[in-house]
Image (cartoon, rainbow, N blue to C red):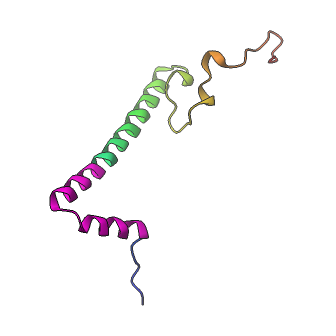
Amino acid sequence: MGVPQASGKSEIFEVVLRFMPDWVQFTVLGLVLLAVLVSWGVKLKRKLAYRRAVREGRPMHAAAQYGQGRGADYLGSYAPQTRQDGTTP
């Protein structure tokens, strides 16, 4: 029976940390933890903004839509204009 091994990335990370002084190890681990917490905070903020927009009845394009991409999804004034007959030029 083999014991499942850690992924290659985690092994490399551990080897690199092992050769660093303690204060550098703690700093690197703290920065990684901070990055994870910040990413969670940004996701939570976007999700709350989306829910708030839905609850207030604002149009969906006015708020950042949770889980949606960027770029062509938000054309704004650059979106194709529709004619009165319902077609686009």
Report whether 58 appears left or right of 5: right
| Residue displayed at 56% across by 36% down | 69
Report whether 88 appears left or right of 72: right
Q: Nearer the viewer, residue 84 or 26?
A: 26
Q: State the quadrant of the C terminus.
A: top right
Report whether 1 appears left or right of 71: left
Report whether 46 appears left or right of 32: right
Q: State the quadrant of the N terminus.
A: bottom left
Q: In this picture, is 1 found above or below 49?
A: below
| Residue displayed at 38% across by 34% down | 45
| Residue displayed at 30% across by 52% down | 32
Q: Which range is magenta?
A: 8-33
Q: In this picture, is 18 found above or below 82?
A: below
Q: Position of residue 35 (x, y in %)?
A: 32, 46
Q: Is residue 10 magenta?
A: yes
Q: Is residue 15 magenta?
A: yes
| Residue displayed at 41% across by 79% down | 4
Total of numbered circles in the picture?
0
User: Residue placed farthest to the top in the image?
Assistant: 84
Q: Position of residue 78 (x, y in %)?
A: 65, 18
Q: Position of residue 20 (x, y in %)?
A: 22, 63
User: Residue placed farthest to the left in the image?
Assistant: 23
Q: Main secondary structure of the magenta part?
A: helix
